[in-house]
Image (cartoon, rainbow, N blue to C red):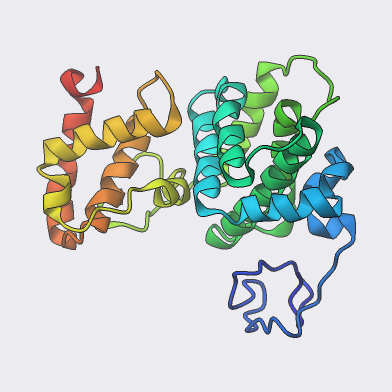
């Protein structure tokens, strides 16, 4: 789908075009069904975008639980390179939940189509949130496709990825997220602004409504640490990711800005405590 004014790519759930600000009229938007316009993932596995796998793949990609798993996949990779392969089973399992039993060949196509559409959405959202120029967005997205195609596309080169390739992508990806200020009051104590904000917001539990839901500062620290461990499946403790979960939990619990500032240093101190992190 393209904006009727600037003809830039637009998502079906957007109300306004983030590029030019035009209100999107779904009756007048330009639909482009050429393979390259459907997804940047077409070049890696064209058959995955045939009508049948595409219809199923789009259904999966628009499923909120699947998209949360996809975002967790990227978050897991950022904390541990091995998750590029190890987290794969969680992504595939979530796709199976949506489409049910499917012949292996067809399912492989649906998997790649779903993942490609989710990738396009992810980088489109990030480009708007972080105000990335198109060349930066396209470069990061293409490099991510090069990595994940090894894990999900059949007949892709099976050679090992050099660790330097993974490190270089992560360095460039993280650099594109660096900010001097974060969006929440508690962000003042964060040393990784603003690498994890989008992912944490997507993965945060929906049942946090009050301070009683999260408890004391130490309880918030423990819960954030356990939440981080569970969602990214990493054995390595990630202080700033756990801290980001804590900051978002306080905001979701409607804690006042002043109370957030009072709580956040005790929370960070608790996260540094060996009894919490072990």
The location of residue 260, given as percent across then percent down, is 17, 54
Q: Quadrant of residue 219?
A: top left
Residue pictured at 33% horizontal, 43% vertical: 244
Whether residue 268 is visible: no
Position of 245 compared to 24: left or right? left
Which corner quadrant holds the C terminus? top left
The residue at 62%/38% (across/down) is 172
Q: Is residue 139 above or below residue 80?
A: below
Which of the pair 34/136 is nearer the observer? 34
Between 252 and 22, the one lying in front of the other is: 252
Residue name at image x 81 percent, y 51 percent: 52
What is the x, y in percent for residue 268? 21, 36
Q: Could you tell me which residue is drawn at 66 percent across and 37 percent down?
A: 101
Q: Position of residue 87 (x, y in %)?
A: 55, 27
The tally of labels here is 0
Q: Report whether 180 appears left or right of 93.
A: left
Image quadrant where one finds the N terminus: bottom right
Q: Quadrant of residue 10?
A: bottom right
| Residue 100 visible in the picture | yes
Foreground residue, 126 or 228?
228
Left-right relation of 104 to 43? left
Q: Residue furthest front?
A: 101
| Residue 99, quarter of the rendered image | top right
When the figure is inspected, residue 136 is found, relative to residue 273, above or below; the finding is: below
The x, y position of residue 8, in whole percent, is 76, 70
Examine the rendered structure and indicate whether residue 210 appears above or below residue 42: below
């Amino acid at each position: 789908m393209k904006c009727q004014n600037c003809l830039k790519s637009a998502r079906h759930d957007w109300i306004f075009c983030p590029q030019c600000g035009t209100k999107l009229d779904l009756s007048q938007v330009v639909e482009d069904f050429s393979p390259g316009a459907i997804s940047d993932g077409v070049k890696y596995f064209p058959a995955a975008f045939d009508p049948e796998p595409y219809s199923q793949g789009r259904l999966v990609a628009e499923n909120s639980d699947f998209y949360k798993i996809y975002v967790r996949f990227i978050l897991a990779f950022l904390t541990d390179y091995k998750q590029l392969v190890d987290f794969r089973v969680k992504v595939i399992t979530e796709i199976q939940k949506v489409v049910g039993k499917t012949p292996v060949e067809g399912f492989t196509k649906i998997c790649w189509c779903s993942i490609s559409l989710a990738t396009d959405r992810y980088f489109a959202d990030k480009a708007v949130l972080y105000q990335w120029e198109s060349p930066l967005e396209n470069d990061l997205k293409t490099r991510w496709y090069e990595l994940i195609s090894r894990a999900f596309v059949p007949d892709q080169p099976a050679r090992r990825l050099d660790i330097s390739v993974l490190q270089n992508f992560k360095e460039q990806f993280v650099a594109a997220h660096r900010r001097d200020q974060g969006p929440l009051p508690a962000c003042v104590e964060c040393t990784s602004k603003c690498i994890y904000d989008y992912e944490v917001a997507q993965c945060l539990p929906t049942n946090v409504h009050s301070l009683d839901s999260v408890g004391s500062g130490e309880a918030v620290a423990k819960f954030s640490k356990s939440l981080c461990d569970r969602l990214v499946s990493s054995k390595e403790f990630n202080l700033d990711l756990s801290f980001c979960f804590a900051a978002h939990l306080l905001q979701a619990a409607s804690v006042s800005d002043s109370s957030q500032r009072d709580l956040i240093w005790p929370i960070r101190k608790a996260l540094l405590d060996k009894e919490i992190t072990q």
